[in-house]
Image (spheres, rainbow, N blue to C red):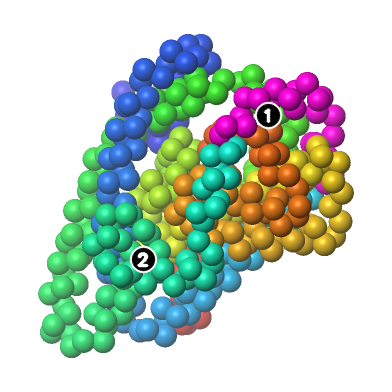
Amino acid sequence: MKKIKLHTKIFLGLVVGIIAGIIFGEKILIIEPIGTVFLHLITMIVVPLVFVSLMLGTASLGDVRKLGRIGAKTAAYFIITTIIAIVVGLFLANAVQPGKGLSPDVQEQLYKNFEAKAQAGLKHMEEKPSIIEVIVNIVPENPIRAFIDGNMLQIIFMALLFGVVLTLIKKDKSKPIITFLDGLNDVFIQVVHIVMKLAPYGVLALSAAVVGQFGTDILITLLKYSMVVLGGLFLYTVSVNSLSIRLLGRMSPLRFFKAVKEAIVIAFSTSSSMATLPVAMDDVESIGVKREYSSFVIPLGATVNMDGTALYQGVSAVFIAQIYGIHLGITGQVTIVLMAVLSSIGTAGVPMAGIIALALVLKQLGIPLEGIALILGVERLLDMVRTSTNVIGNMACSVVIQQLEEKGNK
């Protein structure tokens, strides 16, 4: 009898979970703790794995200038793809006009149901640090506190710093440390493989809980808006990433997507780029991406690169503006692009980051922030898809960066 592959089991768990959520509704929430345990297990390994693998990858580069080149290329790639994602979202939102035709009764009901949640998100926005503060706080005052809080920007900074230092000291001093880190890295990866055996059950529980709690009625109510966001995410994910993988990464998009199925399903079911990190790095390594590239690009992308979130912000801003009858000209559209790019970094590690980033865009455009309540009913469901887009973009970037670096060194 042919053994069922893990990614097939995970996909079946996702499908069964969605069906169970539709059938049993909120009663299915009883199995949510199973998904929570799985999420905690995979999140548990993220911080040590990222720190060790990134330090190891940096040390193996052996050249500080190479690290600078990789960093510059990665930043440029993230900024360009984020802008493309927002433009795709704005184009679809202006063409389809999802905010036109939503009845006043539906608007009133949405406000009533989700106003409290919207206010909670706006309260977090007041606590959001400025971009300058985010940059300054990348350097930790207390390294232990950075690990306890899971502050990924600070952890990445320390890993890069210590990795660079390992290349600067004498080899007879650094070699034992690098050997130890290599062994420790293998231990963490093995833990990920063990945890992934529980993935089908965790994914089933998480997807069932989401569908059971939010149902499909709200999705139908906001069908036009939801379809524009989902259509935009699908269009961007398939076309832009496929083109960059083929033209810049010199790899078959089909081979890429086939290899990263597990990471996509985990991203979709958990709505967390961080929780998907270990699986994403493992998946791209299976198609030849060296750890020195994946361990730098993917953790950094999970922290600051939000292609899917940027597209969602563009569609949502136009949707809410259309409901309020506010016309957004060229200046308004350009403002959305700039604000979405900046907020990708500015909201890193902040609770309810998607809502806060959108609130910043609305505030800049003079659109009532209360309009966020209109879309919160489908926020969780759309978050699952846009997180998948974010993760795919990070993995595609690692393929592209490796090809650019290897090609440049020939």
Kindly report which numbered mark, 1 or 2, lies closer to the viewer in this rendering.
1
Residue 379 x/y as whole percent: 59, 36
Q: Along the line of sight, which residue is nearer the eye, 219 or 111?
A: 111
Mark seen at residue 318: none
Q: Is residue 80 magenta?
A: no
Q: How many marks?
A: 2
Q: Along the line of sight, which residue is nearer the eye, 394 or 328?
A: 328
- Mark 1 and mark 2 lie on one chain; the one further toward the N terminus is 1
Q: Is 306 on the left or on the right of 204, as rendered?
A: right
Q: Which residue is mark 2?
A: 154
Q: Which residues are magenta?
A: 92-117
Residue 378 lies in what quarter of the image? top right
Q: Residue at x 74, y 61 (%)?
A: 335
Q: Circle 1 — which element? A: helix
Q: CA distance from mark 1 to mark 2?
A: 38 Å
Residue 126 x/y as whole percent: 54, 53
